[in-house]
Amino acid sequence: MKKIIDFYMDGFNNLPDWARSIWFIVLLKLFIFFFIFKIFFFQNKLKKDFATDSERADHVIEQITKP
Amino acid sequence: MLESFDLSLVNWSRAQFALTAMYHWIFVPLTLGLGFILAFMETRYVQTGDPEWKRITKFWMKLFGINFAIGVATGIILEFEFGTNWSNYSWFVGDIFGAPLAIEGIMAFFLESTFIAVMFFGWNKVSKRAHLISTWLVAVGANLSAVWILVANAWMQNPRGMKFNPDTARNEMVNFWDVILSPTAVTKFLHTTTSGFVLAAVFVVGISAWFLLKRREILFAKRSMVVASTFGIISSIMLIATGDSSAREMAEIQPMKFAAMEALYDGQTNAPLIAIGLIGDTQQDPMDSTAREDFKIKIEIPNALSYMAFLKADAFVPGIKDLVLGNEKHGIMSYKEKIKRGYVAQQTLIQYKKAKKENSADLSMLRAKFEDQEWLDNNFAYFGYGSYFDPDPTILEENAFKMVPPISLSFYSFHIMVILGGHFLLLFIVVLWLLFKNKLANNKIILWTALWTIPFAYIASEAGWVVAEVGRQPWVVQDLMTTAMAVSQIDTMSVMITFWLFAFTFTALLIAEIKIMTKQIKTGPTKQGGKQ
């Protein structure tokens, strides 16, 4: 286990400059995706609006058979 | 019935999904193909022990890393959109894709985080052979992680291996192998991944051409080009073969898409394939029964469309109007009839829901219909068409024509994809031939062409998705669920806001990728023993 941790630590400690920029972009991107987009803009509509699967099913049936 | 859908919401939701999927697809194909190119290069290093091959591998590995890191998780946005913007769709298909997509996430994470780490960090820490195995596993793993999402897409184009449960309003998987090994899934996976291989080969050939134009790194550039153009030729041949089987399969499963991508209004035997064409201005949207084929210019290959679709030069290829209006002679059911049958299926589902609520005596009779294969084949199979029902026969026919996908967009996307695919194959052959003759380094026309072909590889790749996704409109799930049925009833403004947020975020990511990559390309491969 220690060998594996050392392997990763050594790799990250010796990152070239371009890779550091890339890691910064990756972390920023993941933060934007999961902590801004997901929380503020992308809640699961059916989970949010209905308490049970039966209610969700009724809603979907209503939607896909709209008169 | 169509009036009940908010078309502005549907169109913004489509635009948002298209934007996200197309941006995601800018990053993915290079990862799919460059992984294998790297693996071949490193294999040469292990075979020969020549440090130049190691240097070559490390340079392309760096570009692979940049592209992979910028692109990683851009696909997760699509999953967010499923739950928020396409909740009816997600619910309707949830039991088919929940598990496979979860497997994909876990598999991709473990394969890639483990072996990519060895690939980048392990040069001096693991044996040459172990490093090579890791590189190959990254290439294979990246392609395997595309399996499930492509199977999901294929299922939407050709739903099978499932059964609709009227109690839960969900499709439940009854045969895993029918889902994963459907001809559509196999063809889609092979065609999509090989298109990524071709794009990556164009990328490597183009950038190597730039080094030759700059008279830098001659050996590096030539060796890279040999690997990439050989890989490109093999991949292009596979791409043509899988494209051919895809077309044949489409002619059977999605004949409207097939007719739209050739702008074939009236069906015919010995149908010619339009090699190059310019559609006229008189196209109506939506069209009606008076519509006629109209080309300003066209160059045709006699009988080729019939042969491509059914492997017979004299086969009948149905046109758009045959499919909408029906063609008794060729056993084609009209859209009007399909709409009526779909309406019956939808009404049965409404009645079932009502009977269940009231615990009525009809409940078991209605439930039995959803178990009766004949009723399912004759009515439920057209469930989505029911949304276009109208009791007035004139409006019904107008609605039937509204189901025709955008013809110009389908036609041009298909032809751009095919023509560019031919150009790439020709380029690989010419580059390899000139390399063999040792005349490439001085041929500026070919070198500039190779460099400027890079953006065209991306255009061809995106055009392929436009054919696949625009050509199948109005369906999200072929014949069962239209795009309008699939969309969540949320505020259109919120979809517009997220559209622009994504446009900004993804554009920023793309600019970052291009800037970092061009800087690294200009820097070139490191000197022997240098830091990667």
Image (cartoon, coloured by chain):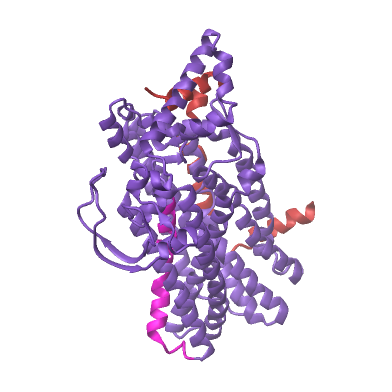
Q: Position of residue B469 (x, y in %)?
A: 42, 48
Quadrant of the rendering where the C terminus of chain B is positioned: bottom right
Q: Is residue B411 above or below residue B476?
A: below
- Would residue B467 be counted in the magenta stretch? yes
- Would residue B39 be counted in the magenta stretch? no
| Chain letter of the red region | A
Most common secondary structure along the magenta stretch: helix
Query: Visible in this render: residue B65?
Result: no
Lateral position of residue A38 relative to residue B105, left or right: left
| Chain letter of the purple region | B
Q: Residue at x 58, y 77 (%)?
A: B227
In the rendered image, the residue lying farthest to the left is B282
Q: Is residue B391 above or below residue B464?
A: above
Count up the numbered dots. Answer: 0
Lateral position of residue A11 relative to residue B228, left or right: right
Rendering quarter of residue B13: top left
Instruction: Looking at the picture, tell me which residue is in the foreground, B123 or B281.
Output: B281
Q: Residue at x 74, y 56 (%)?
A: A6
Q: Is residue B399 above or below residue B33?
A: above
Quadrant of the rendering where the N terminus of chain B is positioned: top left
Instruction: Looking at the picture, tell me which residue is in the foreground, B221 or B340.
Output: B340
Instruction: Looking at the picture, tell me which residue is in the foreground, B500 or A51.
Output: A51
Q: Residue at x 39, y 43 (%)?
A: B328
Query: Visible in this render: residue B379?
Result: yes
Q: Which residues are magenta?
A: B439-468
Instruction: Looking at the picture, tell me which residue is in the foreground, B352 or B23.
Output: B352
Q: Position of residue B421 (x, y in %)?
A: 44, 68
In the rendered image, the residue lying farthest to the front is B329
